[in-house]
Image (cartoon, helix red, strand yellow):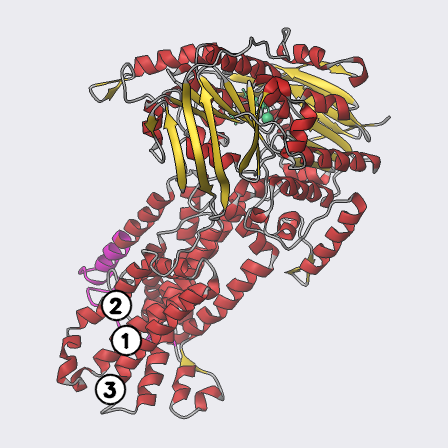
Amino acid sequence: MDLKRSIFITIIVAFLYSIVILIGKDTTQPLIILTSMIATTISVATPLTLGALCGTFCERSGVTNIGIEGMMLSAAFFGWLTSIYLNTIYHVTPLPSLLIGVFVAILTGGLLGLLHAWLSVTFKVDQIISGTVINILATGVTGFLNRQLFFEKGSIFGGNVPHAPGTLPIIAIPGLSQIPVFGKVFEQQPIAWTAIILVFVANFVLFRTRWGLRTRAVGEHPRAADTVGINVSFMRYINVIIGGCLAGLGGAYFTLESVPSFEPLMTNGRGFISLAAMIFGNWTPLGAWAAALVFGAAQAFQINLQFFRDLIPPQWAFLQQSYIVGLTPYILTMIILAGLIGRTTSPAADGTPYEK
Amino acid sequence: MDTVLEVKGITKKFPGVLANDHVDFNLRKGEIHALLGENGAGKSTLMNIIYGLTSPDDGEILINGKATHFHSPKDAIACGIGMVHQHFMLVPVFTVAENIMLGSEKLRNGVLDIVQVNKDLKELSTQYGLEIDPTSLVHDLPVGIQQRVEIIKALYRKAEILILDEPTAVLTPQEVEDLFIIIRKLVDQGISVIFITHKLKEVLSIADRITVMRGGKVIATDDPKQTNEQALASQMVGRTVILKVDKTPAKPGDVVLSVKDLHVQDDRKIETVRGVSFEVRKGEILGIAGVQGNGQTELAEAMTGLRHAISGEIRIQDQNVFNHPPRDLVEKGMGHIPEDRQKHGFVMQYPISDNLVLCSYYVSPFCRRGVLQNSAIGTNAENLIKRFDIRTPSPYVPTSKLSGGNQQKVIVARELSRNIKFLVANQPTRGLDVGSIEYIHHEIVQMRDEGIGVVLISAELDEIMALSDRIAVMYHGEIVAILPADKVTREELGLMMAGSLKPEVSTI
Ligand SMILES: Nc1ncnc2c1ncn2[C@@H]1O[C@H](COP(=O)(O)OP(=O)(O)OP(=O)(O)O)[C@@H](O)[C@H]1O
Ligand SMILES: [Mg+2]
C-alpha cells in the first residue's frame, strides 16, 4: 500500500467519523459515538473483506471473478435455508443450526467457484460471461426458491416464514472488551473475527508459502509456470474454489450474522464493491482489508446517522434524506475505480485462459 | 563417449503441418551439439517434445539408454533436462530468487526458505562463474542477464542436459562472447548442451557436432572441422545459398528523407537521441551501426511516428513530417520493418491475409465503398506467401501460429510489396534462417536499385557491412561518423561503436 492511498484512506475515514461525531455531540458523548462507529465499521466491512479476499485468490491465479455478488447471494440464501430447516423441521437447537448453516454457505460458495473454474478454465468461456452467468443464476434461483418455499400455499413452510434461529452470538475478547466504553469494539460476531484472521492467513499463504508463489506465477506468466512443471489448470481450479468458499462465508454474514432473515437481492452490490476493494488494495489481502474498512466506514456513517436521525440539528437536515448518505460507498467505488487515487496493476495474465 | 539423450522416430503433426517427421537425434555426454535449420523446420517443436511440453504423436525418448515417457516438464526436469526457451520463461515481477526456485521451492516449516535459496545461488554462481543478484526484479534486468537467470534456473534443478533455443538472437556481440565462455565452462563440468541458432559462424566456432533439419526431417549430422558455412547453408535450405550480397555501386538521386538535429526521450524520460542529423537519398542504403541501447530504438520510433520527439526536423522530400502520425507517414511513402515484430509489426490473432493488408486495407482494391473485398485480400495473400516463401498451411491461419522466422517474413512481405519511397528497416532479419536472409537482402538491394531510400538499423555488423552504401555509427545517442561503406573496416567500425575511436574523416 503506497503513501498516496494510505493518506486517502485516513482522510476519508477521519472525515466520515468527524461528521457523525459533530452531529451527535450535543446529545451523546463523542467517545460513545466513536466507539459505535468503529464497531459498526468492523462489522459491516466483514462481507467486503471476505469478498475482496475471494477476488484476490481468483485473480492472483489469473481468473477474473465478477461473480462474487452471486456467490454471496446464493450462500446467504442456502445457509439461511439450512439453518431454518434444521431449526424448525428437525428441532435442532439454534447454535448448531446456525453453524451448519455457515458450513452450507461456504459449501455453496465453493460449488459456485467450481462452476466458475469449470466454465473459465476447462471450457475457456469468457470469464466476464462466466461471472455474469453466476450472478444471473444466483438472482433467479434464490428469488424463485424464496417465493416457492415461503410464500406459496402448500409449500414446506406453509406460506409463512418461520422464525429463524436468530443470529450468531457475540464473542467478546476477554480483557479488551472490559475496557470502559471503548471495549464494545471488541465485541463482534464470529464471522467478523474469522474474516480478520483470514486476512492475515491469506497474506501469509500468498507471500510466504509455496502455494502462494505458484499461485502468483500462474497469474502472471502461466507458460513460465508450466515450463517448470506447475499444473496451471489445477492451481486455477483450487484457487477459484478457495475464493468461492471465502465469498460463501461472506454470504453467511448477511443472513446468519447480520440479520436473521433473507430478502431477494439483499447483497445489494456488495460483491462488486469487494472487487473495488481488491483493486484498491492492489490485489493484496492487507490492502484489500484496508480498502474494505473504508467502504465499511462509509456504510457505518450511513447507519450511525440514522441512529442519530431525530437529533440532527436543522443545518444538517439535508443529511436526513438518507439516500444521499446511502450513495457514499458507491461514489467512493467510482472514485477508486476511475483510478483517481493512483493506478494499481493487475496480475499480467488476469482474465486470459491458458492455451498450451 | 556415453550417449545421454537419444530420440528415435519422433513424429509430431499440427493441423496442416508435419512439424517433426521421424526425427532421430542423439546427444553425447559433455558435448555441444548444434541444431540448425530453416524457419519452421521443427527445431523448437523437437525441443519442446524432449522437454515434455508437447507430446509427440509417435517415437521414443531414451535418457541414458532408458526409455522414458514425459507427461509434463516436471518429468523431464526430474530426468535432468533443462531448457532455455526462445522466448524467456521468467515472471517479470518476481525476483531472481523467486523465479529460480519456482516449481522446486525450498521450505522450512512450510515457509519459503529464501535464505537457503540465496545461499544455494551463491554456490552455483561461484561454481560456474555466473554472477547474479538474487534480490533484483527480473523486469529490471537486461536480456543478457535474464538469460543468465534462465541458465541458473536449469542448473539449480541439477540439469545435466541443457537445451538453448536460439540463445544468441537477442544478444549483443559482447553478450554472445560471455555466453560462449559460460557454455564452455558448463561443458567442462560434464553438462551436455543442445544449441539452436541460425548463425553459421557461431555454430562452427562452438559446436562439437552439428545436426541440420529441414521440413521436419533430420538431413545430416556433420563434424564442424569437415564442413563450412557454405555447405551448412546449402544443407539447411536444400539449394545453394549465396552468403555474400551481390550488389552494384549505388546511384544516389535526390534526398528523400532528411533528419535534422533530432532529440528524443525514452520511456524513462532520458534523452537517448541527442541531436541526430542525416540524409538518405533515393537509391542508397544508409546503415546505422551501433551497440544496442545507444538510441537506435528511439530514433527509429521517432522517424516512423511511433514516438513523440522533443525537437528537431524530419522531412520526406520537401514536406515537414515532424511528429506526424504513422498513417500520414505511410501515405507519404514510408515503409517500416519494426524491431519488435510481435508488438509493432502485426496483430497476433489476425489471419496472415489480414496482416498483409494492415497498411492498405482501406483503399482500393482491398476496400470498395467501405466494404472489405475478401477475394482481393485473399489473392494478395496467396501471391505474397508464394513470393516471400512464408511457410504456412493456409493464408487464413492466425499469425501467432507461425514459427518466429515466418512471422518476420509476413511483415517484410507487406512492407516491401507496397509502393514506398523509403524504408526504415530495424533488425529486418532477426531470427531468420540463411535462406530467408539471402532473399530479404536481395529484395532490399533491389528496392534500392529501383530508387528507394533505405535506412537499415542492425546490431549485426555483418549485415551492416554487406548491405550499406554509407554507414552512420551511433554512440550514446549521437551519430559520431557517417562514412562510405568501402572506406571502413570491420575493426574500425567495432571501435567506433564502442566509443574508443574518434574518426578523423567524417563525410556527411
Ligand atoms: N502450436 C502450434 N500450432 C500449429 N502449428 C504449429 C504450432 N507450433 C508450431 N507449429 C508449426 O510447426 C512448424 C515447426 O515450428 P517450429 O517452431 O518448431 O520451427 P523452428 O524450427 O523452431 O523455426 P524458427 O527458427 O523460426 O523458430 C511450423 O510450420 C509452425 O508453423
Ligand atoms: Mg524456434
B376 to B266, vertically: above or below: above
Quadrant observed for ligand 1 in the rendered image: top right
Element class at badge 2 = helix
Amino acid type for the residue under numbered disc 3:
Gly
Circle 3 chain? A
Q: Looking at the rendered structure, which numbered label has been put on residue A24?
A: 3
Badge 2 density bin: few <14, some 14–19, many ≥20, Cα 10 Å: some
Do the residues bearing badges 3 and 1 touch, measured as CB atoms within 8 Å?
Answer: no
User: For the residues marked 2 and 1, what is the alpha-carbon distance in whole angstroms?
Assistant: 9 Å
Locate residue A326 relative to residue B99 in the image: left or right.
left
First of labels 2, 3 by sequence position: 3
**Image point 60% across, 19% down: which residue?**
B485
- Across and down, in percent, residue A319 comes to 17, 76
Residue B430 on the magenta segment: no
Q: Which residue is mark 1?
A: A301
Name the kind of residue labelled 1 in the image: Phe
| Numbered badge on residue A328 | 2
Q: Chain of mark 1?
A: A
The amino acid sitting under disc 2 is: Thr
Q: Is B434 or B500 nearer to us in this picture?
A: B500
| Image: B139 above or below B444 | below
- Asked which secondary structure carries label 3, the reply is helix
Mark 1 CB near ligand 1 (8 Å cut): no
Discs 2, 1 touching: Cβ within 8 Å? yes
